[in-house]
């Protein structure tokens, strides 16, 4: 018996894992994010590792303290973090509507990059653990937006919980000219890359 844990409360990541048809449980990390890196690819790897390792440590501790009710099993913990980057500036979730406007004005009419870092922590029945950390990058080309369009979009509330203040899978889709790379990576989880990396380790997600 094996178990897959998503260390994120993101509804987009939940939907992507459901979309590919695997069974998993959600156990979001709750610790404070600590950023020591500056390069976007390194930042998302660092944050995804923090999330996955926090949840994995808690699960392992729970197993040790509740042997009488835990079924011995292999566990796979998936941690992820996504940021938008433009002109070497990392754009996270907006603090408020004014911040959302600033980000969207910065992104409108140009190319930017979306990075998602992923950490996979594997724990076998004996408690031995290993991890794999990687990132995926997608280039997004957003068309020009007028002040009216930006403010109208902000008024929907959609930008407020999203990196870069927009959701490519939502109402902002009409402002996206094209992308280069993995669409699901922009949504929040590069599921194809995860599947591929696990295959390299000899792991089939559907037989896990």
Image (tube, grey):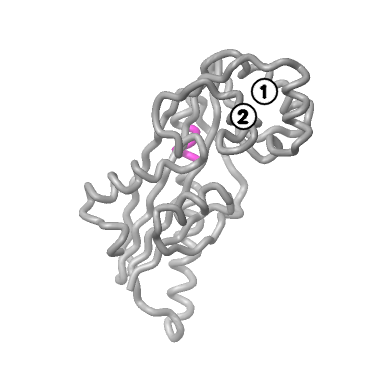
Residue 155: quarter of image: top right
Q: Position of residue 207 (x, y in %)?
A: 28, 64
Q: Position of residue 69 (x, y in %)?
A: 46, 84
Residue 58, placed above or below residue 146: below
Q: Position of residue 74 (x, y in %)?
A: 33, 67
Near-viewer residue (137 or 142): 142
Residue 137, placed above or below residue 5: above
Numbered range of the magenta stretch: 43-47
The residue at 44%/74% (across/down) is 63
Residue 196, placed above or below residue 106: below
Inter-mark Cα distance, 2 to 1: 6 Å
Near-viewer residue (139 or 35): 139
Q: Predominant secondary structure in magenta?
A: helix
The residue at 56%/20% (across/down) is 142
Does 74 lie within the magenta span? no
> Callout 1: helix, strand or loop?
helix
Q: Can you identify the residue that label 2 sits on?
A: 164
Q: How many marks?
A: 2
**Circles 2 and 1: CB distance less than 8 Å?**
yes
Q: Categorize mark 1 by other alpha carbons within 10 Å: few (<14), some (14-19), many (20+).
A: many
Q: Can you identify the residue that label 1 sits on?
A: 103
């Amino acid at each position: 018996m094996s178990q897959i844990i998503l260390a994120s409360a993101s509804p987009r990541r939940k939907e992507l894992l459901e979309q590919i048809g695997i069974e998993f449980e959600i156990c979001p990390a709750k610790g404070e994010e600590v950023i020591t890196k500056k390069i976007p690819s390194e930042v998302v790897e660092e944050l995804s590792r923090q999330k996955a390792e926090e949840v994995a440590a808690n699960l392992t501790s729970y197993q040790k303290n509740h042997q009488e009710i835990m079924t011995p099993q292999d566990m796979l913990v998936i941690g992820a973090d996504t940021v938008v980057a433009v002109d070497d500036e990392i754009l996270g979730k907006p603090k408020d509507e004014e911040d959302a406007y600033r980000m969207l004005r910065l992104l409108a009419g140009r190319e930017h990059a979306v990075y998602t870092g992923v950490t996979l922590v594997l724990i076998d029945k004996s408690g031995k653990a290993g991890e794999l950390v990687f990132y995926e990058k997608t280039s997004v080309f957003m068309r020009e937006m007028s002040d009216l369009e930006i403010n109208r979009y902000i008024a929907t509330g959609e930008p407020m919980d999203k990196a870069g203040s927009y959701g490519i899978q939502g109402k902002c889709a009409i402002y996206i000219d094209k992308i280069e790379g993995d669409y699901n990576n922009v949504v929040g989880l590069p599921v194809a890359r995860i599947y591929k990396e696990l295959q390299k380790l000899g792991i089939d997600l559907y037989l896990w």
